[in-house]
Image: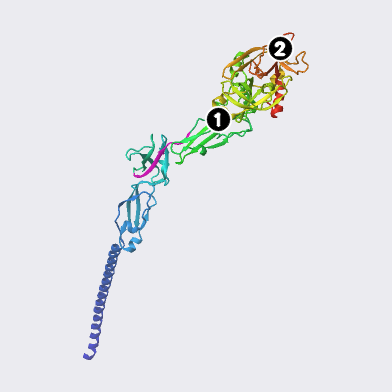
Amino acid sequence: MIILACPIMNCKNEGRIKKDKCRKDCEVSKKKKIAIASFIVLFLVCCGVIFYFTYRIELILPEYVLELGDEINTDPAFYVKGTKWAVDGTSIDVSNVDCGKEGTYEVRIQHGWQKFTSCVVIEDTIPPTLVLHKEDFYLEKNSECTAKMFVSKSRDLSGKVKLSLSTDGKIFSDKVSFDSCGEYTLTIKATDINGNERKKKKTVVVDTAPVFGELPEYYVAVDSTPDFLEMITAVDEVDGDVTEKIKADLSGIDMTEEGIGVVSFSVTDSYGLTAKKEIEVKVYQPENLQSLINHHEINRLDQRIIGAYNLYDAGIYEDDNVEAVLEKLSTSLVRLRKDISGGGYSYGSGFVLEMNEEEVIICTNHHVVKEYAVIDIYFYDGTSAEGVVLGRTGNSATEDDVALVSVKRENIPDDLFRELRTIHVNMGSWREMANESGIDVGLKCVDEYGGIWKNRKGILLNKEKKPEHFEKYGTFTEVSFDLVHGMSGSAVVDGYGNLMGMAVCITTVDNVNRYWCVTLSNLAESYYEITGRCMYYE
């Protein structure tokens, strides 16, 4: 019995022991699990703390000032601080910032859950750029100058730049002028819209531009080739005579048709100062231009006339008044005289028929100059000059008793030459005249002392007639007034100033004197025979 009881008791104890062990093991396992969980939690908390303090960033630039036009900084490290990897992961948004415009803008910063803003203030504190021209400047006295004249470049990011200048460096204005010549120092200033300024100095020389002489009125013939510079002069205060530097711009004139054009003249001195002037040029057909001269609307002394048939024509008058015409034609009359060896002299009369800048041509009778090669000419004011006989036609017994005598222009004083005029010739008017027209005519003669010697007025009895009882004579013009020795070669004119003939001779039949003149037709033919030119225009 005793032997059987022992195994049963062992089994019960063993089971109890196993249960206790199992319970203990579970408790240990539970504790281990709690410990592990606690460790994990602690680890995670530690990791979180570490992550928080290593990943987060801080704003270090809440506001800053940026110069207008400068590029805005987009580097995160400029705005925040933290670990490198945290800063590198930061996003910078500058999309709403306008660097070209003043104002306050926000820079948006984001890093994970963190968001910041940094204010950027765009300001303009830098003066504009200002670059002046390098070359020397010469200004005209009393002319206005502006700062822009001296500035090569000036700009500012703010936009518009105002330029001004000053003569004393204190008072600035848009423009200045100088009322006296000399050297001056100007201060040029560039100012932007925010008041930023930059100044630079420039030395200038003030001088006078050249001055043109009096410019004439121009009247020119169609298709003529005038030298517009011929009578234009200019002088400069420093350079003196600068006439040779004058230039003419003919682009404003058409010489192929009648009208009014413009010629522009310019002249520049050694300082670069330029004077400019424009004149109107009136272009006419030659016959219309000559008509202006003939009717005393223009003349060679007051206007520059180019391309007219005869610049020196005494012209015609509106009223039929022989006495008034003879008074005005005195400047066309001459006395011819030849001293004869052994004593004595011969003389006669004449008139200016043609003029140019080379010579003055006198018309008279063949029998006045005889066979002389030279003869003394006395003009209306008493001035004398040597005349050279150009040629002769006919003689005192023929209808073409004509001679031409030339006086060189160089032997005539300028004052006298300006006053001389040629007798007006119009063959058209002559041809249309009735033979027995009875028109008023007259002549005047001067002496060698500058006085009036003879003055005659009458009527034209016959335009063309052959004297009776003198078969050897040709055809002449007959006048009513008496002719005396010394009148030969005188111009006979009508009351309008037209040449009607040239006094030549007297015939006497039954004690009745008749007075004759070379006809205008014969005079024109003789002129052509001697010179090869026509002496008239129609």
Q: Nearer the viewer, residue 196 or 104?
A: 196
The reply to whether dot 1 and dot 2 touch (C-beta < 8 Å) is no
Q: Residue furthest left?
A: 2
Q: Residue furthest front?
A: 342
Q: Secondary structure at mark 1?
A: strand
| Picture quadrant of residue 19 | bottom left
Q: As displayed, is residue 238 above or below residue 82? A: above
| Picture quadrant of residue 113 | bottom left
Residue 280 disc label? 1
Q: As displayed, is residue 18 above or below residue 312? A: below
Magenta part of the protein: which range?
A: 196-211
Q: As displayed, is residue 38 above or below residue 391? A: below
Q: Label 1 amino acid?
A: Glu
The disc, 1 or 2, on the residue closer to the chain's N-terminal end is 1
Drawn side of residue 531 relative to residue 59, left or right: right
Position of the C terminus, as image quadrant, is top right
Residue 125, position as x, y percentages in the image:
33, 47
Q: Label 2 amino acid?
A: Arg
Q: Nearer the viewer, residue 145 or 205?
A: 205
**Residue 197 shown in magenta:** yes
Residue under numbered circle 2: 514
Q: Main secondary structure of the magenta part?
A: strand
Position of the N terminus, as image quadrant, is bottom left
**Residue 355 seen in the current view:** no
**Residue 487 shown in magenta:** no
Residue 82, position as x, y percentages in the image:
30, 61
Residue 523, position as x, y percentages in the image:
70, 22
